[in-house]
Image (cartoon, rainbow, N blue to C red):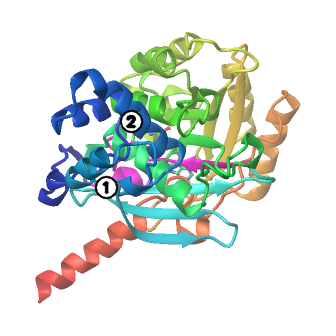
């Protein structure tokens, strides 16, 4: 079973911590901590906020409307550094993946998936590893797990915008139509609803209109089905909801998504129906991974349609992405198309999600695999020396 551990800040990070990723309140507290008058801290935090999150500056010297003395004080105590990128890859289809090392040495991945036209989604991680052990997902085989802080979640967005060169300058504004990174999906490593406090705080930062300004309607949080937290997610974040469903009956779902033994389909669907603001304009996305001979019959497609009846929903059929050591296989293409045709007839438009970034192991359920393998082999090598 994976073990949940707490983050341990490194000595270097503790000495001159980065302000990147902090919430407004955290920023204010940091300013007061280095001697900024309490009365002025709020206003100063607002100024910093705009430089950090609207312009993405990496140097206090660039903050032209901040007094020189304060800039110097800030530079003495803090940095605007992002976590270290230990590997950056670009797929033949344009998908980009970054492996990011956090202050305590833990690593997470995030993936940018450009869409047709100018839009694109960033897939962010909410935990290092995952405790859920879904049998078809590689991330669940990782042993050590910890929650990311909200700053570590926000930092993933900062890193992507750096790489995409998407920060405006006072001379060169960024119009909405020019954005490349338009959407955020919490579909990377981890279960976001086991880390709701930090996910909610990160969404507050990412959606803030004076900063990164990606609207809550363009932020989707995916869960394997932590039923008691679903309503709270909606109330606290206003984000779009996605459910990793994968099976239409409890017997099979118990096997694929062990969390189902705790919150079965009845409990899950009661929570989904209760999601605030559900409407045709705010639909739930259901993800369904296509596993050969496991969940891919026409009868199951029909059961899926029945299950989703009267829930404003979208469907995403995800061709299974294999990983080293898995016993599952991806359904045949004809099987997926036959399955999709049934959903199509029931009114679900183009439900098949094309796998992206498979060549760089950036596709769903493949995250972290390479780096874990590499580290394991490095460890083996080190212990042999
Ligand atoms: N824990 C959350 C967030 C992770 S989202 C959740 O389960 O929703 C990652 C998505 O990729 C989930 O829908 C997951 O079921 C799916 N997935 C995992 N492994 C996969 C694989 N090998 N192939 C295709 N999809 C996979």
Asked if one can make out residue 281 in the rendered structure from this viewpoint, the answer is yes
Q: Residue at x 64, y 28 (%)?
A: 217
How many numbered marks appear? Answer: 2
Q: Name the residue under label 2.
A: 258
Prevailing SS of the magenta stretch: loop
Of 190 and 27, which appears nearest the observer?
Answer: 27
Q: Is residue 232 left or right of residue 113?
A: left
Residue 348 at x, y = what percent?
81, 32
Q: What stretch is highlighted in magenta?
A: 119-143
Q: Name the residue under label 1.
A: 142
Q: Residue 181 carries which label?
A: none
Q: Is residue 213 left or right of residue 263?
A: right
| Mark 1 secondary-structure assignment | loop
Residue 305 at x, y = what percent?
73, 25
Q: Nearer the viewer, mark 2 or mark 1?
A: 1
| Mark 2 secondary-structure assignment | helix
Q: In this view, does 215 lie to the left or right of 195?
A: right
Q: Residues within 10 Å of mark 2 (few under 14, many from 20)?
A: some
Q: Residues within 10 Å of mark 1 (few under 14, many from 20)?
A: some
Of 251 and 151, which appears nearest the observer?
Answer: 151
- The span from disc 2 to disc 1 (Cα, nearest Å) is 16 Å
Q: In which quarter of the image is residue 277?
A: top right
Earlier in the chain: of badge 2 and badge 1, it is 1
Q: Residue at x 46, y 33 (%)?
A: 205
**Residue 126 among those drawn in magenta:** yes
Q: If the image is split into quadrants, where does the C terminus sit?
A: bottom left
């Amino acid at each position: 079973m994976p073990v949940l551990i707490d983050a341990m800040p490194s000595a270097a990070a503790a000495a001159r911590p980065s302000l990147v990723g902090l919430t407004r309140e955290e920023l204010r507290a940091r300013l007061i901590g280095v001697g900024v008058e309490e009365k002025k801290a709020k206003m100063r935090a607002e100024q910093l906020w705009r430089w950090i999150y609207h312009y993405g500056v990496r140097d206090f010297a660039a903050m032209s409307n901040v007094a020189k003395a304060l800039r110097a004080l800030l530079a003495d105590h803090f940095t605007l550094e992002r976590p270290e990128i230990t590997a950056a890859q670009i797929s033949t289809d344009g998908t980009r993946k970054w492996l990011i090392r956090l202050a305590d040495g833990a690593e997470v991945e995030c993936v940018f998936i450009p869409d047709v036209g100018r839009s694109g989604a960033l897939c962010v991680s909410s935990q290092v590893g995952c405790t859920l052990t879904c049998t078809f997902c590689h991330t669940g085989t990782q042993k050590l797990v910890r929650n990311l802080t909200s700053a570590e979640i926000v930092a993933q967005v900062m890193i992507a915008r750096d790489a995409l060169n998407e920060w405006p300058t006072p001379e060169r504004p960024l119009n909405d139509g020019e954005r490349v990174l338009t959407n955020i999906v919490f579909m990377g490593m981890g279960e976001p609803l086991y880390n709701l406090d930090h996910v909610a705080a990160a969404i507050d930062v990412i959606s803030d209109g004076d900063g990164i300004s990606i609207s809550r309607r363009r932020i989707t949080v995916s869960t394997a089905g932590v039923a008691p937290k679903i309503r709270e997610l909606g109330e606290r974040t206003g984000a779009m909801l996605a459910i990793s469903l994968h099976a239409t009956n409890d017997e099979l779902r118990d096997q694929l998504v062990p969390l189902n033994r705790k919150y079965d389909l009845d409990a899950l669907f009661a929570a989904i129906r209760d999601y605030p603001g559900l409407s045709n304009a705010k639909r739930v996305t259901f993800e369904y991974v296509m596993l050969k001979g496991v969940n891919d019959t026409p009868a199951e497609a029909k059961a899926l349609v029945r299950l989703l009846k009267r829930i404003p929903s979208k469907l995403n059929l995800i061709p299974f992405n294999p990983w080293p050591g898995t016993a599952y296989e991806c359904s045949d293409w004809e099987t997926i198309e036959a399955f999709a045709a049934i959903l199509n007839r029931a009114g679900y438009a183009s439900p098949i999600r094309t796998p992206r970034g498979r060549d760089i192991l950036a596709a769903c359920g493949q995250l972290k695999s390479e780096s874990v393998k590499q580290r394991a082999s490095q460890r083996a090598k080190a212990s042999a020396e």
